[in-house]
Structure formats: C-alpha cells, structure tokens
Image: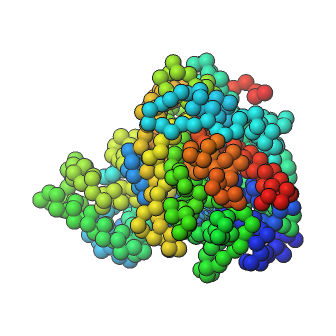
Amino acid sequence: MSVVAHKDPKLAGRAIELPEGPEWVSALRVFDGHVAETLASVAHTLYPHDGLPERVYRRVVAQFDRMAAASPNAAQMMAQLVDLVDEAMPLPFVELSDGYRTEVLKRIEGTPAFRLVQRSTVRFLYDDIEVWQAFGYEGASVHLGGYVKRGFDDLDWLPDPPAAS
Amino acid sequence: MDAISTPKRYDLDDDGVVVIIGSGAGGGTLAHELTRRGVEVVLMEAGKHLTAEDFVNDEWGGYEMLSWLDKRTASGSWRVAKDHPEAPSWHCQVVGGTTTHWSGCCYRLIADEMRARSVYGEIPGTSLIDWPITLEELEPYYDLAETKMGVTGTNGLPPLPPNNNFKVMYWGASRLGFDVSTGRHAINSVDYDGRPATIQDGFTITGDKTGSRWSTLNVEIPRALATGKLDLRPQSRAVQVEHDAAGKASGVVYVDGNGVRQRQKARAVVLAGNCVESPRLLLHSASGRFPNGLANGWGHVGRHYLRHVIQTVWSVFDKPVNMHRGEIMTGLVRDFVRHDPARGFAGGYYVELNSMGLPTTAAFLEPGWWGRDFVSVIEQYSHMAGMLLSGEDMPQPGNRVTLTDELDAFGVPVANIHYDDHPNDLRLRSHGYKTMTAIHKAAGAKRIIEAPAYPASHNLGSNRMAARAEDGVLDGNGRAHEMRNLFVADGSSFATGGACNPTLTIVALAIRQADFIAGQMAKGEL
Ligand SMILES: Cc1cc2nc3c(=O)[nH]c(=O)nc-3n(C[C@H](O)[C@H](O)[C@H](O)COP(=O)(O)OP(=O)(O)OC[C@H]3O[C@@H](n4cnc5c(N)ncnc54)[C@H](O)[C@@H]3O)c2cc1C
C-alpha cells in the first residue's frame, strides 16, 4: 500500500527532523524527558499503528512542544495531562501495559486536557509525510501536473460509467 | 494589469460610492456587476489579496492560510457545538472570500423550494416562509450566473469526467436505480473564458493554483478592477455601519491594514460578509435611533440561521480507490430533492461525491474517536470512498447569531451561533444516511462510517428576505425593509435554504441586485 508522497514544495522546509534514539528529547524546547516520553506513549496508545515507527509519534510530540512554546495555556494543559495519566495507577503511564494505558485514557476522556491532546495528535500524526506514504495518500500534485495523467480515473475493479452526455 | 498597478482610489469623504463589505461569492460578484454598469464601488475585504502563487497544495496549510479563524462560540443541540465549539462555521477571510475555498458544485433551487411554506404546509417549531421572488424571476439570472461561472453541463460545456471515487458511487447508485451523474461545477472541463481545464490536482479547496475553477478572486474582481471604477481595499475590516439623521446608511467605519480606524462615506452600503459577519455587523451598529441594530425593527437580524443538513459517509473497500486524486465533488444523485411527504419529512436532499485527503479525513471522520478500531479504518485510507449529503434544514427563529460579552481585537463582540436540530432535520438526516450507506453497500463496501457534520460550510438565512417586513430583514431585492440604501448580498439573504449548494444562487441574486441598484440610481432614487 505504501506510496511516494509529496509535500507542497513551498512547505518542504517545515518538516521536523529529530535525532534517532533516546536523544530525541534533547531537540525539544519546553518538555523534559519524562513529559516527552509520556506524551509519545499517550499518542501511541491513542492511535496504535503497529506498522509505524516510533519516530512518527515523537514528531507529534515535537509539534506539541512547539504549541507549548507558543501558548502557556497549551503548555499547562499538556503538563496536566501527564499528571492525570501518571496519577491514575500505582505506576507511571510509560511503565503500564497497553491494556492499562487504554483504560487510563478512557477514564480521563472527558477532560479538556485529554481533548486537546487527542485532537492535536490527529492534527499532526496524519499530516506527517511518512504516515501519508504508509497509508497511500500521495499529497501535493499540482507541481507534478495534477492527477489527470497520474491515475485520477484508474480504478479498474468496477465497470466504467458510460460516457457522460 | 494596468488597473491593478494603478488602483482606483476614492476619497474617504466621497459619498457617491457604493461600499460593499466582503469580496466573496456575493460581494465580489456584485462589485463586478455594478462597476461594469458604471457604478463607483469601494470593496472592503478583511483578508489579504493573495494570488495563485501564494496557495499551497496542502490541506492544513490551505485551511490556515484562507480561513476566518477569529473566535466564535456555539450553543444548542447541534453536534458541531460539541465538536467545534470555537469554529462552528467554516468560511474564508481573503480577497475572493469562500470562493477561494469552495469545490464548485452548482445547482439551482427548484420551484417548490422557493415556495416552501405553501408546499410543505405548517410545520410546528419552524418559521418557514415563501421566497418573495419566484423561480421564474430568478431563472434569467441563473442563466447569466452559469455563463459567467462556466458551469459544466450548461452552455454546451461538457461535464467533468468520472474519477475513481465517482466510479464507486456510480456503480452503487445505478444498481439501486438512482439518477446519478458527475453533476455540474464551476470548474472547467475544457478551456473556457481564458481559464484552463482542470488538471485534477485534488486541491480545489486550498485555493486553486491553476485557475480552472471560477472564483471572484480570479474572475469577478480582476474584471471589476479593469473597469477603473473599483477601489479594492484588502485588509480592511468593517466594524460599524453608520446612518444619518434621516435614517439612511451614510458610511462605514473600518480598521485598515495599519490598524488605523477610517470612515468611508457612502451613497449605499452592501453587507456581503457571509452569514455570520453580516448580522454581527448589523447588530453591532445599533444606535439611539435603532437600538436593536440596523434593519432589526422586527427582530429578525441573526435569526432563522440555516446551515443545511450536511453529513458524510466514508466506506472501506477491498480494493484501492485513491479518492484524493481529482476534483473532489464530481458526483450527484438527484432522486431525493423533491418534497415527498411519504418519506416522513419535508424538503429534500442531494447526495454528492466527496473526498478528502488523509489529514482531514482523519480529523472529520469522528472527532472524538481513538483506539484500535479507528486505526483499522484510517490505515485503509487508500481503499476509502466518500459522499456528502446536502439537504434542506428548517428555519427556526431561535437558531440565531447573537453578540456575546467578549470583544475581539477590533472591539466588536464575538458572535455566538445557536442551533437546535429540528425533528424534521433529524428525520431527513437519518433518511440520507440510509441512502448513502445503501449506495456504498451496493458497490461492495466492507465497512461504512456515518460521519457527523463538520463546521457549517453552507451558512444561510440570518438576514432573510421576506415579502412582509414583519417576516424578515430584506425585500426581494436584498434591500433592508427599514433602510432604503442598505443591502445584503450574501447567503444570509436566503428566505429558505433549499437542498442545493448555495453559491450559484448567491451569484444569481447578486447579478439581479446589481440590475436593481443601478436602475434605482439611474432613476435618482438611490
Ligand atoms: C470547504 C467548502 C466547500 C464549499 N463548496 C461549495 C460548493 O461546492 N458549492 C457551493 O455552492 N458552495 C460551496 N461552499 C459554500 C460557499 O463557499 C459559500 O456559500 C459562499 O462562498 C458564500 O458566499 P458569501 O458571499 O455569503 O460569503 P463569502 O464567500 O464567505 O465571503 C465573505 C467575505 O466577507 C469578508 N468579510 C466578513 N466580514 C467582514 C468585515 N467586517 N469587513 C470586511 N470584510 C469582511 C470575509 O473575509 C469574506 O472574504 C463551500 C464552502 C466551504 C467552506
């Protein structure tokens, strides 16, 4: 299913690059290691794509870090979320099993902090070009001549509609 | 080009100009139609003057560049109040307004819809009326609108070709015996009017980079500028409409791009700021003489707000669809548009093709949804197909735009939009979901998601036309019953919503209004 995807050339410079491995947290401005790792595991538990590498969730957290740097309110909500998920069980969230993590998130679903983090995860996770490629979304096309000669009507498992009048 | 490099400037004290607030479907069209009739126009637009170069092929990038992002609040039983409490309505803030964003579907109201009260009868809880004008009166202007916009399927223009997503819809709908076609669009299927045929880039709604789709940005405004009669003022935010001692509109206070307050005098004022901003300005322009706001003596400003019954269905198939490739709304089923009481609800709906990229499909599928089930659906993005329903919702006096106590950066109160679903809306909604799921099922869908409405993109009715002043804000020419030189030229003027996407009607009404205004001026009555 994986494809080559394109970001609009104008936006190409905006992609986030993080170091591989545990040093990724050192690229963040606001979050400390614990907050960053906790948020990454929250994002992963919310949208557990088994085929995606951990770095896509880390890039989501890097976007949260930018949000937190720009808005004290966002920073406070994210810190609040980390407290909520850490206090729910006798173990910190990052040390919980998958089943317990899900249970903890279900419990706090109604809170504004959860809402912000869940919505923002959707916003950034599915806007990541590596995720686009994994799920077959090809993205920007006008600089490649659109899809008019690149498959806008190539579906071949149903009969073609009769020529329009 | 010359007209753009040496723009016309009217004096702030020039009280011979018509001031139009908002450059979208209604305001941008009216500006062109008036200037080509020789009328001098100042067009104020809150947003920037962008060009095709500025636009991006990127869903969130385009949204953030074009949208009206100022805060609003929402209340009522509609799902939007829960999912999008600070952005309940979706439109643009840019020269060209929401015509930089729209997907080009162009359908006409039908005669029964314009006589809704007479045809549907009395429906408890609604404030249904008939339009003060008939379809017959509007038809010549629909013809003009279709010609200027290059609507496919009219004037000998071929329809847009079927894309992958449409093939799925077509197969399902035709197996069920429905009348299904790619529909009609203000998007070129062949070169027309100096604009190219579409290259099927799939990003119509982030600001069309090739210009194959009609917008006021790429057609009406350049032509209005070329007349030498238009003074276009981007980044100019109207904050108040003023009147004179005789109770006539006399000018508009606005904040210019440098943050400076200015006062432009006017011979007539036209509000075309979209369905939330136009009533907001009228309400905020209250004075000693008009304590409830301008044109609001009968209390209708902001009321009877409509947003259509809009919803999407997304389905997963065994084989690839790649719905993101190509124009996004090229599909139409019209079997359900006629009022048929046997269905158990008044009014009707269209089923239209719809596609979104991965970023917004994920965001709108079901905004609070997370976990393994969501993941199992979205991972199959390339195998998904989509459709949208556009149906008539019932006007209710309590569904309304009001001012809150919170002020925005310009000192104008933030608007609240209240909307409660009427039982008729819910019956239509349920019927529509069943039709759409049946179509995808007939095409072999293995999983079908009934997605909720996203922020309102068809905003209508909040300054409605009515034959009698006690029923609405405007007369059949879009003129305020209470102020003879105050007009509205946007979707808020609709007496009822009908089922179809509204822009073709907004444009037709604007052309008709230009005839009226120019005629009144010629007679010395305005
Ligand atoms: C994603 C999307 C897809 C759509 N697709 C379709 C479609 O396929 N077919 C269809 O018929 N319709 C479609 N629509 C709806 C269509 O775009 C609108 O109905 C139409 O553009 C509304 O026209 P309008 O004149 O009322 O306002 P707009 O086009 O929204 O223009 C209003 C303008 O007024 C300006 N303004 C507001 N307040 C002020 C102020 N105080 N001072 C100065 N300027 C101000 C705004 O910035 C804006 O530019 C779509 C809408 C969206 C969001």
The residue at 85%/49% (across/down) is B193
- In the image, A16: left or right of B62? left
The answer to whether B72 is drawn above or below residue B79 in the figure is: below
The answer to whether B443 is drawn above or below residue B76 in the figure is: above
Q: Quadrant of the C terminus of chain A?
A: top right
- In the image, B249: left or right of B463? right
- In the image, A154: left or right of B397? right
Quadrant hosting residue B378: top left
Q: Nearest the camera: B216 or B514?
A: B514
Residue B409 position in % (x across, y down)? 50, 74
The residue at 38%/44% (across/down) is B77
Q: Nearest the camera: B396 or B358?
A: B396
Quadrant hosting residue B139: top right
Residue B518 position in % (x across, y down)? 82, 56
The residue at 35%/71% (across/down) is A73
Q: Nearest the camera: B195 or B403?
A: B403
Colour scheme used in the picture?
Answer: rainbow
Residue B514 position in % (x across, y down)? 78, 53
Instruction: Tell me the quadrant of ligand 1.
Output: bottom right
Q: Could you tell me if residue B165 is visible in this image?
A: no
Q: Nearest the camera: A163 or B517?
A: B517
Q: How many marks?
A: 0
Residue B275 position in % (x across, y down)? 57, 53
Q: Could you tell me if residue B294 is visible in this image?
A: yes
Looking at this view, name the residue that lies furthest to the front. Answer: B246
The answer to whether B443 is drawn above or below residue A96 in the figure is: above
The residue at 61%/63% (across/down) is B93
